[in-house]
Amino acid sequence: MISNYSNTTSSLLCKEQIPLLQGQGCYIDDVTLSNMLHIAFVRSPYAHAHITNINTTTAKALPGVVGVFSGRDICSYIKPIRPMLDNSSFKATDWYPIAQNKVRYVGEIVAAIVASDRYIAEDAAENVIVEYDPLPVVSSAIEGMSTNSPLVHPKLKSNIILHTQSGLDKNDKAFTSADLIVKGKFQHPRVTGIPIETCGVIAKYKNNTDELAIWTSTQIPHLLRDALSESLNMHVNQIRVIAPDVGGGFGIKMQALPEEVIVSYLSRYLLLPIKWTQDRMENLQASFHSRDAIVEAKLLAKSDGSIVGLKAQAICDVGAYNAFPLTAGLEPFTIGSALAGPYKFAHYSYEGYAVATNKCPMGAYRGVGFVLGPMVMEGLLDRLSNKIGMDPIRLRKKNLAQPTEFPFQSPAGPVYDSGNYPALLDLAQKEAPYSKWRDLQAKGRKEGKMLGIGISCFIEMTGMGRDTYRKRGMINVPAFDGAKLQIDKNGHVAAFISTPSQGQGQKTTFAQLVSNVLGVSPDVINVHLGDTASTPYGSGTFASRSLVSGGGALLQATNMMIVKLINLASAHWNIETDKIQFKNGTIIRSDNESDYLPIEYLAKLAYTPFQDLPPSIEPGLSITVSYNPPAAVSSAAVHMALVEIDNSTYETIIKDYVVAEDCGNKVNPAIVEGQVRGGITQGIGIALLEELSYDNEGQLINGTLIDYLVPGIYESPSIRIVSMETPSPWSIGGYKGVGESGTIGAPSTITNAVYDALETSPEHTRLPLTPDRIFKLKNLSNL
């Protein structure tokens, strides 16, 4: 009998962060191997061009240069990165890690220089002379969809590489019952994650064993190994991927990088280890970008504010190639599933397009298309509120799904497992408090101040398993995760999980999970992540899945371990298992609770038996589990912000920010709060500061952190977080993900607050809301 399962919540200190804060971490740039070479890349200054000649003579002559390699030297021996999507409209793209005859975006690699140190490699790169014949550029998705547009991939005969449709209604007749329509155009900028640690990779090939070891700052060690196996024509078991300490990922490190393939191939070719560390300009120019979507939507409603339906079209600029493993379908699929939010209505129609352009390829960034969900729906609700003269909170309450309706079928497709959205909105309203904010706003307006209140209610789908990815056709994502739990003969516990950390505190959280069930201190549980040689196969860390998927596997393994311990005790005592209890790390006889066996004793029994064990009990204590979450689980949140627009500078000042969060049962509330706070800060950056700007020739205009602004301590407001816990009936432990929630909700909340401060409701929303755009909104009534 197992009677100790616990959802114990405790804000334990995140122990893995202590060495990082003390400068004792081991990031990619800290790894040094004997005889290690360094690599630098020559990148295209053109967005679209034929390569007519590459002159490497001067570069090769520099002392310390080991070799200069072009596409002609490498591409015959490797396969392109070619993620697939099981969708009839999808068009695959062959992305060779190093360009052969043509470049398709600024920053695409055209040559690689290997040298004895990085300085020599960088100097040699400047001496490689590349001649180009420029081609017409596709500078936007709208342009790319036109019939006379140049083609990024002429063989595909179109720049539209995915077209998706979804919804419960695709017929306009379903919308005729509406009394009124509010429309909006919502333009989310191209952005990217800015981790403190940029990308990097070290590859070491062992010729005597034909094995390749790769250290890289990845979020997907096992999936990256799959991609490298395919591209390098090596067996999976010949490749080991190691993710050491990773200084932030935010999604941009969950794609296979061209550099990872090139460095691996050249290490195998030269029989020496090679290291590459990305600089910040490369990070902005040639790491994966995200969003860059335009959504045009119509919200249909009754005169009393009841929503009748939503009709939307999204056009996503996905850059030059499909990224592995999620493909260009990531944004259009996610946007389509997110637009309905927590609201109940009858009719929904959505079309999404992924359009190739001559820009850096698109990948994931925290929140992905879920950010567009509240940006569109909450923006339209505020427009509807203004149109019918109804308080925005009252309007939202009128349309929220009710707690008695779960599991709730969203009009946009997903099924929400559990929640209480009206209570969550009440919680946020009370914490602000909303009535006080309105009083402050009224008083401030009399004094000439521009004060505004923004509200956003939204859903984050988390812990998505095979069912979700199969429906999307994303065949390169296995969507399950693995965990191995071991107890050695001294009773020490070790856990190995397939979801690595990029600073989220996974080691502490997973140790707490095991501790809660096994009844031993988390301090004696060693958690191992990020190494394909020791962790079971799994999808990795993205889409707020680690606790639900990796944690689910770990909880299953822990409970199976307890069963084995009980079986060991049964054999030792020669009694039936139903007469044995497991409580707080100890095996106890039900008929005599003074007779017990600690885990340490049973561990010795398992490894060095004092008696013969039955054939049904294998020696040792090691359990490995693969776990596929049966369905995605839905977290929910309400964000509210009070902002002031400076009358002189038109700068947005966030006066107060409140979050009501429901992410199911919590393991470590402090870690959850840290995730939410960090996500909100990134969301504020999206709302007010961040945009990767390209000109009509496909040139990135703001490729440094001088020009691409990210929020600092000045822009990070005081954030008050309150929570409720609605356990998921569909996940082990009742857990839900929360890693992207802050970033999903903040942009729409800040946008609505700015519009409320300006007392305007424009049909065209274009982020970021920089001071110059706010000035135009206030004084010119258009962007």
Image (cartoon, rainbow, N blue to C red):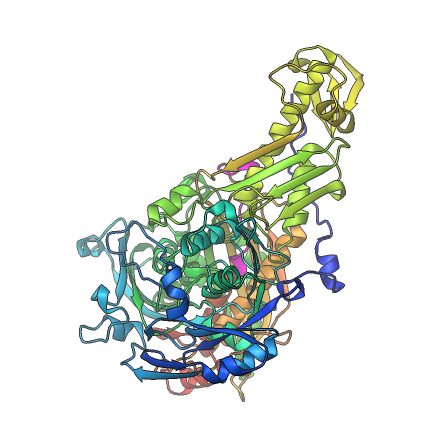
Tell me: residue 281, above or below residue 637.
below
| Residue 330 image offset from top left, x and y in percent | 38, 58
Q: Nearer the viewer, residue 565 or 534?
A: 534
| Residue 515 image offset from top left, x and y in percent | 70, 38
Q: Nearer the viewer, residue 286 or 706?
A: 286
Count of labels in the image: 0
| Residue 362 image offset from top left, x and y in percent | 40, 65
Tell me: residue 20, above or below residue 222.
below
Outermost residue to the right: 594
Q: Nearer the viewer, residue 747 or 493?
A: 493
* Residue 539 located left or right of residue 155: right
Magenta segment: does it hold 55? no
* Residue 116 located left or right of residue 165: right
Tell me: residue 419, above or below residue 143.
above
Q: At 61% from the left edge and 48% from the top edge, which residue is drawn? A: 529
Q: Nearer the viewer, residue 717 or 248?
A: 248
Can see residue 297? no
Q: Quadrant of the N terminus?
A: top right
Magenta portion: prevailing SS class? loop
Q: At 52% from the left edge and 57% from the top edge, which residue is drawn? A: 741
Tell me: residue 171, above or below residue 371.
above
The quarter of the picture where residue 579 lies is top right
Can see residue 363? yes
Q: At 41% from the left edge and 78% from the top edge, which residue is drawn? A: 44
Magenta segment: does it hold 740? yes
Q: Quadrant of the C terminus?
A: bottom left
| Residue 52 image offset from top left, x and y in percent | 32, 81
From which residue to which does the magenta span run?
730-742
